């Protein structure tokens, strides 16, 4: 594509006033003018990288817009007086500011400049009204320590002059989103220094696309480039919707050192109407490589040049169409695993295989434990091998470098806790305790679900903090759907609270009870006259979580131990019956109404946190509610304790027993203000599959149409009755396609494990963008009619 020479020199002078710049005018030093993205793309183009043509609406254009609309001083004054810790005020102010930006007129000179540049872009692309990506480029997004400052809008496949102007305005509006205002204040960035530029770049209708790291992100190997890709548009790779093809390339020779081809079951593409579509593929079409070896090496060559230019490892986005490679973004790699040699699996002996429940690679000495009585044998860094784990094993699990169990699936105790702790875990091996010799040095590859004999080069504990590389982290996208986290470990509260997360969607009190009681059955404490000790210890732990996340909500589920888990506590055998199937036995709300004195202590702990500590962000949630009578009995106990004296008190129920599909309207009448879908138990009860059964593990699938249909109906019913709907089961943590469906169906929030927060935020953002685009196009079509 040729660049016009007639007016470029003269345009520099004119565009200085109109607020538009072409990439060829920009370099890395222009961040204040065009933000981090704009400056970086200009820099890439300056040393010959194949960057799609683009122009940038500068930060000065945005300032001019504010000034001419009379918004600048009013916004500064409003934000200065805003208490960002007061959530209602923050939400209200954000909406008011965004509405002000939406309603203000475009300055005529900026409008003319943007539309003139768009027409010029069409000439360069040799197409009338080209499709473009409109991407926010905030001036503060690359400042040290401000990884949240650039959480602004990106809109893909924009076409037409009016659509372009609205997309630019949407990017401007996003500067005043609630989460953006909150994080900007917390990072101490002066509001008067904030501005935003907007990159308008020709869309690449890619045949294949993906990402490249100029350092191996798994092990820090600086001699290796890693390339991953899939067919169609690149959002399937970034969002995790497909397992991409994977290549590793020697940086010096550009020879392929490793190739792993995946079955890529989904292709994203732009249809003839300009809309994003996805289609499923199978068989040979899904298995064929998305790149030839020649293209892999060419992409690697660009990566080598880019890293050499910047002087630090880079995270690069690429796209290919008709054999031509485009570089559409490059940013510093911010974190990688510890330096290590390449892992060689080919010669290693496989001991057992199972389900990779918590990804990671770790090695150590195998320690076979039959029960907690053997716990002293496990030393820090050993690999824990056992039949299965129980809640009181958590302190022991924290010492392990990895965990391998004979039993269990993706929702087993070992799987859930390992993901929360960031420990590699393989479950359901069936014969791990028999095939893995005690004291043997082994390596656990939990990404593949394989246990090898010997310590493979590169194995280490995956939970170790990542080593920083380069400069600032990539900005997180802003989403309307809230992203919550599932937690239970008190010592993780402060750490996870610093992540890009909107609150806690499931606080598992079981872990807190174990800590507060020193693994003693609560009934034993009551009989010994120590019930208040249990209450106060639980309140202390609940308060720790509520303080760490305030003002963000913390939804705490009251205890849902099953009888077999209670029996394993000190004194438990004296109080707990033996049940053939505890999964559908004496648990949840029914236990509360049979043992109201014990449940009352939990309710009093909630009241202490809310009333005495002033932490009203703590929300109570009832598990495993089977009938309306159970809910009413629990509500009466809440009334007696005084929780409901607070007019702002609302409580949630878990949506895990299918009867909720019938009872939900009546639950709302009883004061329920929120529902959280427990996909683990809901799947179990919809399909009649004991989720603890290894024999039935292949039948347990949250993606079953019956389960997904029930989830859809629960979300719809919540919306009809005006209450919050969330999900806290394992499904969104494991299956990105479920997350996309939840967003489409209008769920309010999604709660996942800490290890997948970043990936899930990106999936949610991509799904929301598609919905917005589809809605916008439908609106344009409806408004335009057939004429």
Image: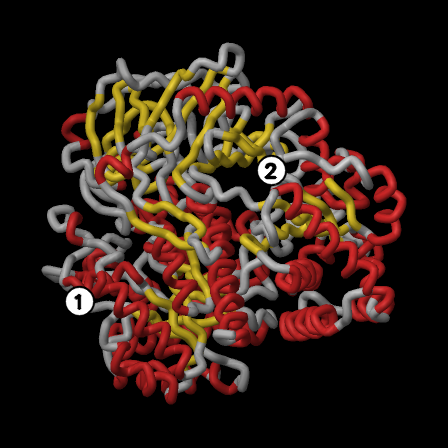
Residue 743 pos. (x, y %): 43, 63
Q: Secondary structure at mark 2?
A: strand
Q: Which mark is residue 346?
A: none
Q: Nearer the viewer, residue 365 or 192?
A: 192
Q: Nearer the viewer, residue 614 or 267?
A: 267
Q: Which of the 4 image quadrants contains residue 287?
A: top left
Q: Residue at x 43, y 37 (%)?
A: 208
The answer to whether one can see residue 493 in this image is yes
Q: Which of the 4 image quadrants contains residue 688?
A: bottom left
- Residue 92 left/right relative to 16: left
Residue 685 pos. (x, y %): 19, 65
Q: Secondary structure at mark 1?
A: loop
Residue 31 pos. (x, y %): 77, 41
In the image, residue 209 sits, relative to residue 568, either above or below, namely: above
Q: Nearer the viewer, residue 498 or 732?
A: 732
- Residue 758 left/right relative to 170: left
Q: Nearer the viewer, residue 475 or 327?
A: 327
In the image, residue 18 sits, relative to residue 543, either above or below, namely: above
In the image, residue 79 sits, relative to residue 171, either above or below, namely: below
Q: Quadrant where the N terminus lies? A: top right
Q: CA distance from mark 1 to mark 2?
A: 54 Å
**Callout 2 environment at 10 Å: few (<14), some (14 to 19), or many (20+)?**
some
- Residue 164 left/right relative to 292: right
Disc with the residue nearer the chain's start (1 vs 2): 2
Q: Residue at x 34, y 59 (%)?
A: 729
Q: Which residue is mark 2?
A: 329
Q: Which mark is residue 585?
A: 1
């Amino acid at each position: 594509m040729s660049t016009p020479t007639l007016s470029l020199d003269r345009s520099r002078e004119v565009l200085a006033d109109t607020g538009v710049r072409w990439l060829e005018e920009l370099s890395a030093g222009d961040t204040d003018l065009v933000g981090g993205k704009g400056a970086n793309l200009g820099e890439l183009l300056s040393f010959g990288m194949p960057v799609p043509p683009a122009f940038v609406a500068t930060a000065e254009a945005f300032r001019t817009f504010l000034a001419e609309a009379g918004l600048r001083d009013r916004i500064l004054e409003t934000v200065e007086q805003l208490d960002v810790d007061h959530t209602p005020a923050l939400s209200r102010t954000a909406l008011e500011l965004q509405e002000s930006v939406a309603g203000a007129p475009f300055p005529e000179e900026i409008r003319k400049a943007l539309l003139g540049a768009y027409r010029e872009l069409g000439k360069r692309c040799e197409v009338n009204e080209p499709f473009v990506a409109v991407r926010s480029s905030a001036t503060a997004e690359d400042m040290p320590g401000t990884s949240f400052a650039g959480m602004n809008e990106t809109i893909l496949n924009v076409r037409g002059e009016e659509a372009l102007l609205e997309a630019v305005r949407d990017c401007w509006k996003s500067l005043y989103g609630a989460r953006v205002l909150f994080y900007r204040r917390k990072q101490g960035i002066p509001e008067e220094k904030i501005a935003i530029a907007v990159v308008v770049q020709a869309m690449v209708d890619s045949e294949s696309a993906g990402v490249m790291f100029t350092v191996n992100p798994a092990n820090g190997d600086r001699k290796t480039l890693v390339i991953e890709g899939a067919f169609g548009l690149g959002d399937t790779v970034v969002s995790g919707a497909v397992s991409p093809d994977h290549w590793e390339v020697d940086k010096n020779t550009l020879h392929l050192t490793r190739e792993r081809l995946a079955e890529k079951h989904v292709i994203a593409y732009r249809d003839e109407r300009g809309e994003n579509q996805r289609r499923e593929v199978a068989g040979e079409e899904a298995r064929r490589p998305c790149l030839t070896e020649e293209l892999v090496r060419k992409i690697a060559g660009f990566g080598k040049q880019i890293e050499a230019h910047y002087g630090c490892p880079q995270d690069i986005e690429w796209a290919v169409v008709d054999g031509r490679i485009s570089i559409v973004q490059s940013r510093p790699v911010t974190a990688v695993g510890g330096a290590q040699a390449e892992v060689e699996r080919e010669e290693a002996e496989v001991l057992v295989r199972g389900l990779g429940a918590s990804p990671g690679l770790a090695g150590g000495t195998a320690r076979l434990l039959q029960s907690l009585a053997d716990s002293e044998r496990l030393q820090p860094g050993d690999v824990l091998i056992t039949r299965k784990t129980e809640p009181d094993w958590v302190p022991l699990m924290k010492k392990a470098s990895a965990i391998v169990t004979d039993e269990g699936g993706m929702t087993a105790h070992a799987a859930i806790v390992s993901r929360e702790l960031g420990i590699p875990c393989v479950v359901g091996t069936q014969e791990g305790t028999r095939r893995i010799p005690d004291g043997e040095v082994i390596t656990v590859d939990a990404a593949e679900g394989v246990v090898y004999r010997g310590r493979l080069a590169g194995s280490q504990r995956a939970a170790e903090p990542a080593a920083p590389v380069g400069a600032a982290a990539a900005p997180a996208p802003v989403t309307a759907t809230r992203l919550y986290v599932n937690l239970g470990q008190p010592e993780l509260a402060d750490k996870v609270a610093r992540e890009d997360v909107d609150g806690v969607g499931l606080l598992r009190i079981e872990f807190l009870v174990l800590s507060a009681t020193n693994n003693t059955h609560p009934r034993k404490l009551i009989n010994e006259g120590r019930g208040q000790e249990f209450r106060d210890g639980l309140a202390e732990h609940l308060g720790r979580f509520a303080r760490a996340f305030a003002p963000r909500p913390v939804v705490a589920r009251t205890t849902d131990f099953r009888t077999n888990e209670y029996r394993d506590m000190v004194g438990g055998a004296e109080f707990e019956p033996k049940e053939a199937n505890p999964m559908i036995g004496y648990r949840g709300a029914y236990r509360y109404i049979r043992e109201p004195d014990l449940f009352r202590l939990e309710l009093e702990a909630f009241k202490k946190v809310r009333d005495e500590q002033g932490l009203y962000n703590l929300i109570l949630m009832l598990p495993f509610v089977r009938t309306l009578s159970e809910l009413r009995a629990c509500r009466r106990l809440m009334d007696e304790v005084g929780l409901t004296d607070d007019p702002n008190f609302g409580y949630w129920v878990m949506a895990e027993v299918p009867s909720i599909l019938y009872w939900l309207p009546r639950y709302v009448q009883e004061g329920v203000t929120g529902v959280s879908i427990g996909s683990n138990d809901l799947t179990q009860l919809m399909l009649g599959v004991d989720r603890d059964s290894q024999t039935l593990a292949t039948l347990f699938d949250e993606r079953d149409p019956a389960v997904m249909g029930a989830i859809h109906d629960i979300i719809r019913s919540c919306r009809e009755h005006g209450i919050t709907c969330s999900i806290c089961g394992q499904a969104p943590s494991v299956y990105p396609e479920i997350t996309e469906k939840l967003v489409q169906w209008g769920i309010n929030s999604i709660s996942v494990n800490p290890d997948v927060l970043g990936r899930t935020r990106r999936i949610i953002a991509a799904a929301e963008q598609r919905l917005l685009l589809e809605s916008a196009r439908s609106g344009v079509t409806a408004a335009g009619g057939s004429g």
